[in-house]
Image: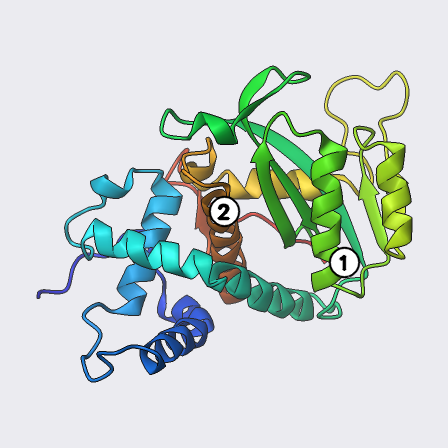
Amino acid sequence: MAERRPYPSDLSDARWELIEPVLTAWRAERRRHALDIGRPPEHDLREIMNAILYIDRTGVQWRYLPHDFPPWETVYGYFAKWQKDGVFAQLNSLLRELVRQKEGRNASPSACVIDAQSVKTSTSVPATSQGTDAGKKIVGRKRSIATDTLGLLLAVLVTAASVQDSVAGTRLLDQVAADHPTIRKVWVDGGYRQHFVEHAATLGIDMEITQRAPGTRGFTPIPKRWAVERTYGWILLHRRLTRDYETLPAGSEAVIHLAMTDLMARRLTGENTISWRDPAKPHQPQIPG
């Protein structure tokens, strides 16, 4: 098969070098347990990941994947397996540690920020996994994320939009405490209730509620919490995330991990993240030290 023309979302050699060991190890483990171990893999892992990144960046449906990629059924099959096996979360964790070290931070964070974002869903999303955020008047799902103080993703939880911030936040904080035992401080906004603060205390985590100063008008970055709000802006550079298109909440969490993996890989290799708003003007979101 002739080599295809590259897409802007394709992995460069440098970015592929960062994630290749994880995908290769995954395939080796799968083949170790497979019955047809002597049969060589039909599709190149780099091309599979390029196809998934194309979906994430452009927002197209799986069936609309260009024909110069492997068949969409195959690509989606890999996406589903990688999501189920935690490969996207593993890539996010690996690259986050590398970015933190590059920024002169410890690999394991000691503080985090939690916030929630309600988004509309597509018609393909089952009604049973949706809800209504009465405050924001949005019918859809809620993305609750925890980031370190650099805005790098530590944990994500997708629920119906009707789930109260403190309820989702409790589950998210349990995940953070289990995966990141070094966390001792967390900042949240005023939407999180007192019982959430008390739950954090039982985990040995000091929670602080940060709010806008009385009388403040317009957009004003709030100390500490602005880092997580900026992360939502970063991931929305991936059009698949402008709305929730995934059938299962776990799939939604996977595309968020994938978006952050793409952003961090570009950060580590010094490559621009091109904004889909104007492809002619490359834009690189900054992750300050």
Residue 151: x and y in percent read 67, 50
Question: Residue 213: x and y, percent?
Answer: 89, 25
Would residue 42 appear left or right of 193 to someone viewing this image?
A: left
Residue 270 visible within the image: no
- Colouring method of the image: rainbow
Q: CA distance from mark 2 to mark 1?
A: 20 Å
Q: What SS does tag 1 mark?
A: helix
Percent position (x, y) of residue 154?
66, 55
Q: Residue furthest bottom?
A: 38
Residue furthest toward the left?
1
Q: Which mark is residue 250?
A: 2
Viewer-proximal residue among 3 and 29? 29
Q: Image quarter for residue 177? A: bottom right
The amino acid beneath tag 2 is Ala
Label 2 CA crowd tier, 10 Å (few <14, some 14–19, many 20+): some
Quick one: quadrant of the N terminus?
bottom left
Badge 2 marks a residue whose secondary structure is helix
Residue 177 circle label: 1
Q: Residue at x 76, y 43 (%)?
A: 170
Is residue 53 something that shows in the picture?
A: yes
Residue 81 position within the rendered picture, expressed as x and y whole percent measured from the top left: 38, 60
Using the rendered view, name the quadrant where residue 126 is placed. Answer: top left
Q: Earlier in the sequence, mark 2 or mark 1?
A: 1
Quadrant for the C terminus, please.
bottom right
Residue 29 is labelled as none
The amino acid type, in three-letter code, at marker 1 is Ala
Label 1, residues with CA under 10 Å away: few <14, some 14-19, many ≥20? some
